[in-house]
Image: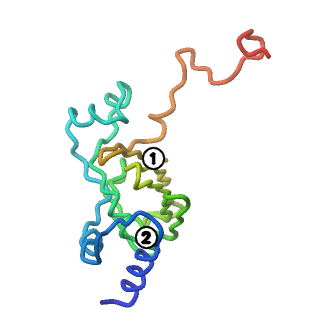
Amino acid sequence: MDKSIKTNLQRIRNRQVDEQMLFANDEAMEQARLRVNLFTAGVTPEDAARSVLANEHRLNDNRIWFSYDMLVLGSRAEGDKFALHVPDLGIVQAEIERVDKLHGQYRWSGQIVNQPDSQFFITQVFSDQYAIGLISTAQGQYQLEAKSGTGWIANSKLEFRLPPDGLDGLDPEDPKHKH
């Protein structure tokens, strides 16, 4: 086994100390490392509608719903790569530059391979089976969110909508905004 792979496996084992054990043994961790796709598109509309993340807007705005595999990142360390399906780019390789852990929250950050000035941040909370992330590329910014194995990815613009009047701000003359 390559020395860098052994080093990364040890880093992953060390992260599990005093934390929730993600893998029952080394074989289970190595099996997770064989999976490279963080998520797989193709969740049925019925399954998407059952997700706690679903609402009428999200179910009808053309975002990509997917099956999310938390162990793909859980089995990776600095220098490792995994695959992301990014709208407007297709499937891309992401390289992990840093892994942070704080109070049961794990955060992986890095860049998209061959995409200058790109970056990603994905935070997972294994105890809640929850993940949230931001992917920034020259083509745009994308958000992802997953809960209990089902999630979505979309251009960030889909999550932020202006009110019907098209104005975004406080009107100091409006009595609702007075103290």
How far is the residue under mark 1 from the one under mark 2? 29 Å
Could you tell me residue 109's position as x and y percent? 50, 63
Residue 164, label in figure: none
Give the structural element (helix, strand or loop) at label 2. helix
Q: Nearer the viewer, residue 111 or 129?
A: 129
Name the residue at 41% across, 63% down: 20
Name the residue at 36% across, 44% down: 147
Q: How is the image coloured?
A: rainbow
Q: Which residue is mark 2?
A: 16
Disc 1 residue type? Answer: Tyr
Q: Residues within 10 Å of mark 2 (few under 14, many from 20)?
A: few
Does residue 40 appear to the left or right of 97 in the view shown? left
Q: Earlier in the sequence, mark 1 or mark 2?
A: 2
Q: Quadrant of the N terminus?
A: bottom left
Q: Quadrant of the C terminus?
A: top right
Residue 142, label in figure: 1
The picture quadrant where one finds residue 9 is bottom left
Name the residue at 25% across, 48% down: 41
Q: Residues within 10 Å of mark 1 (few under 14, many from 20)?
A: many
| Residue 173, placed above or below residue 169 | above
Could you tell me residue 76's position as x and y percent? 39, 70
Q: Nearer the viewer, residue 122 or 105?
A: 105
Could you tell me residue 166's position as x and y percent? 57, 19
| Residue 152, placed above or below residue 8 | above
Name the residue at 27% across, 33% down: 50
